[in-house]
Amino acid sequence: MGKVRTTLVKRTARKLLETYPDLFTGDFEHNKKVVSQLIEYNSKKLRNQIAGYITHLINSAKKREEKSKRI
């Protein structure tokens, strides 16, 4: 079973991706720095969860694109 992400993490990550799509990449460390600049949460854990979910969304979108190109 996978780890469960809260609604706050998912909602915030999707909103950041929608607002700033060009700032994020498939690299977690880069996304972590960008998230810390864009939002003002005092929690490192929450920042890392949001950055990790953004990384997951970007990487899964890339995989879907590659898969559709092969077909």
Image (tube, helix red, strand yellow):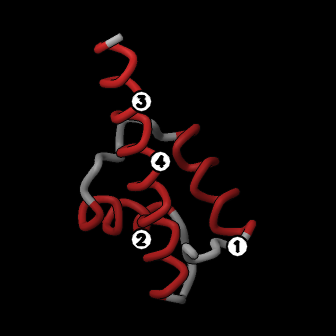
Can you give x and y, in whole percent of width and height, for residue 34 in the image? 36, 60
Q: Is residue 45 shown above or below 47?
A: below
Whichever of callouts 1 and 4 sits on the residue coming sooner in the sequence is: 1
Q: Residue 57, labelled with which disc?
A: 4
CA–CA distance in space, label 1 to label 2:
19 Å
Mark 4 or 2: the one toward you: 4
Could you say which disc has been placed on residue 6 in the image?
1
Q: Nearer the viewer, residue 37 or 7?
A: 7
For disc 1, the neighbor class at 10 Å (few under 14, some 14 to 19, many from 20) is: few
Tell me if 4 is positioned left or right of 54 in this view.
right
Which mark's residue is nearer the viewer, 3 or 4? 3
Amino acid on which disc 2 is placed: Ser
Q: Earlier in the sequence, mark 1 or mark 2?
A: 1
Upstream in sequence: badge 3 or badge 2 = 2
Residue 64 badge: 3
Residue plotted at (29% across, 14% down): 70
Q: From the viewer's perspective, is the residue at label 1 or at label 2 nearer?
A: 1
Q: CA distance from mark 4 to mark 2?
A: 18 Å
Please tell me which of labels 1 and 3 falls first in the chain. Answer: 1
Decide which of tag 4 and tag 2 comes sooner along the chain. Answer: 2
What amino acid type should be assigned to the residue bearing mark 4? Answer: Leu
